[in-house]
Image (cartoon, rainbow, N blue to C red):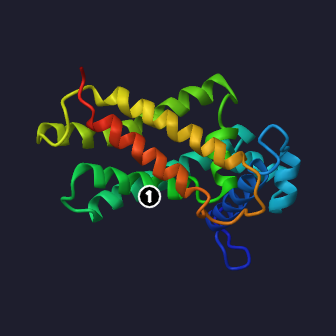
Amino acid sequence: MGDRKYAGRSPEERSSERIARLMDTAIALFGSHGYAATTIGMLCAESNVSTRHFYREVGSRSELLKKIVTTMNQDGEHAAREALTADGRQPVLASIDAAIRAYLGVTCRTRMSARVCYVEVVGVSTDIELWRMNQRDVIVEMFDSLATTAAARGELPNRNYRLVILAIIGAANIFAQEWALSRSSDVGTTDDTFTPYIDTLVELVTAALTTPLP
């Protein structure tokens, strides 16, 4: 009886559909009203998911938030790695430029997604802060490996690039927060209003990576 279909869909398919609706609804509500102001009741009502199914599928608001941000981070990382692969054997700065634009093009696809990923997830709990550090380390390792390999080729100065990349990620977070919370009637996809932030970030990256230690 556990695998009985309903309306032609298996229990697994219906579960996936409920989770997808909850995630889409949470991005809209967390990204407009804020995480703290969004109740489970609001999430269930807007996504047409019962409270019973909410707890069974995601467990809590914080777990739903983590699932959303994890998905965006993973999709952003995948886009960045694809950009690096597509870039071929270009100079490392061009590769990093492409990867940054690809990653932020996913996590900052809209102001609402940027707000969820860079504003609402901050300071929710100690556990989520530790989880955020683990998420961040994946991105640090990706760019650190790229810069360190380039340094070994003589393309960049030899230095501790992990510290540089941590500083760059801090700048990226601030830029995303600034853009996400700025007033605008546009709630669609990333537009030209975010381009100056990315261009400035790339300038900072170029200066940081190419400046040798004194």
Q: Quadrant of residue 88?
A: bottom left
Note whether 187 is above or below 37 in the view shown.
Answer: below
Q: In which quarter of the image is the N terminus?
A: bottom right
> Residue visible at 63% across and 22% down?
126
Residue found farthest to the top: 214
> Residue visible at 79% across and 43% down?
34
Note whether 166 is above or below 33 in the view shown.
Answer: above
Image spot of residue 164 (x, y percent): 36, 30
Q: Work out whether residue 142 or residue 102 is closer to the camera in this orientation and state it.
A: 102
> Residue visible at 24% across and 23% down?
213
Image spot of residue 136 (x, y percent): 47, 36
Note whether 129 is above or below 146 in the view shown.
Answer: above
Q: In which quarter of the image is residue 127?
A: top right
35 sits left or right of 189 in the view: right
30 sits left or right of 146 in the view: right
Image spot of residue 130 (x, y percent): 55, 26
Q: Is mark 1 on a helix, strand or loop?
A: helix
- Does residue 188 show up? yes
* Amino acid type, residue under disc 1 in the picture: Ala
- Does residue 60 show up? no
Residue found farthest to the left: 153
Q: Mark 1 points at which residue?
A: 102
Q: For the residue carrying disc 1, how many other residues have a C-alpha within 10 Å: few (<14), some (14-19), or many (20+)?
A: many
Image spot of residue 83 (x, y percent): 34, 60
Q: Quadrant of residue 173?
A: top right
Note whether 169 is above or below 86 in the view shown.
Answer: above
Q: Quadrant of the C terminus?
A: top left
Q: How many labels does the image show?
A: 1
Q: Work out whether residue 66 or residue 103 is closer to the camera in this orientation and state it.
A: 103
